[in-house]
Amino acid sequence: MSHTLTAWIEGIGLIAPGLPDWACAADVLAGRAPYAPAASVLPTPTLLPPAERRRASRSVRIALATGMAAVAHAGADPRQLPAVLSAATADGYNCVALCETLASDDPRVSPTRFHNSLHNTPAGYWSIATGSMAPSQSLCAYDGSFSAGLLEALVETASRGAPTLLIAYDTEYPAPIFAFRPIPDAAGIGLVLSPTQTERSLAQIAVDLTDAPATPLANPALDNLRLAIPALRGLPLLKLLADGKAAQANLEYLAPLSLAVTLTPVPAPC
């Protein structure tokens, strides 16, 4: 019996080191442009009210920016989209600050610090920024978090019979935690998935489990990026989209399993 999950990709968002948006990344991933390393630039979350904007952490900013880029690309209404947010890490700077406070002579934690320590904080800020009343989920599966989020978004799309937004994101940890979890920068991938093909569909995606190893990227610098930031374990999928050809790649999941992803692009109109 097949357990393959399918959907149609309607929109893509990406922010990563040296890959400031999907248009730029598509050229780099397809080999049409060279990769130039650079720090991720996180846009100011202007959709948030001023008070929430000031409190927004890097995790919130990367999640909002990536999600809104995917929604804009799809021409979708974010208020109508159930969202799946998946991250391998917490807000690293806030985590370190909390540990330092708890180890100090005055271990009282500020409400803002505590608020930003929750794993579903970006989901809450997403609802505030977009005015969405649609349900959201916040997941964590260590280095398999992108694949866990993709599976959940595909299940949501199929079970609800309606589009779903996936936002996979991570941010860096400062010292001293960086020595144990050396994530160097923030990055995020957003996908809008539809249960049926529409005029906005870019490609059909089919996903199943496999015990084959994850597919590396041929460009060593890009593959190092894939391995450095858990959310970017989805880069082989984005490369398939950038190449615009029917093909398959395996994405890292929970060992020893990977996700076998088959992509079939929608032919460009004549």
Image (cartoon, rainbow, N blue to C red):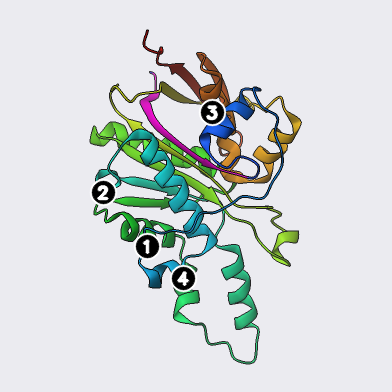
Q: CA distance from mark 1 to mark 4?
A: 10 Å
> Considering only vertical position in the picture, is 209 above or below 175?
above
Does the magenta segment cover residue 219?
Answer: no
Amino acid type of disc 3?
Leu
Counting residues from the start of the chain, the first of labels 2 and 1 encountered is 1
Q: Please state which of the two labelled residues, at mark 3 or mark 2, is closer to the viewer.
A: 2
Image quadrant of residue 270? top left
Q: CA distance from mark 3 to mark 1?
A: 31 Å
Region of the chain picked out in magenta, as a range: 2-16
Q: Residues within 10 Å of mark 1 (few under 14, many from 20)?
A: many
Report the disc number at residue 79: 2
Query: What residue is shown at x 50% (from left), y 75% (from top)?
Result: 113
- The residue carrying mark 1 is 48
Counting residues from the start of the chain, the first of labels 2 and 4 encountered is 4
Query: What residue is shown at x 39% (from left), y 35% (from top)?
Result: 73
Q: Nearer the viewer, residue 236 or 199?
A: 199
Image quadrant of residue 197? top left
Q: Give the x, y percent position of residue 69.
A: 43, 42
Q: CA distance from mark 4 to mark 3?
A: 33 Å
Q: Give the x, y percent position of residue 222.
A: 69, 34
Q: Is residue 142 left or right of residue 5?
A: right
Counting residues from the start of the chain, the first of labels 4 and 3 encountered is 4
- The residue carrying mark 3 is 237
Q: CA distance from mark 2 to mark 4?
A: 22 Å
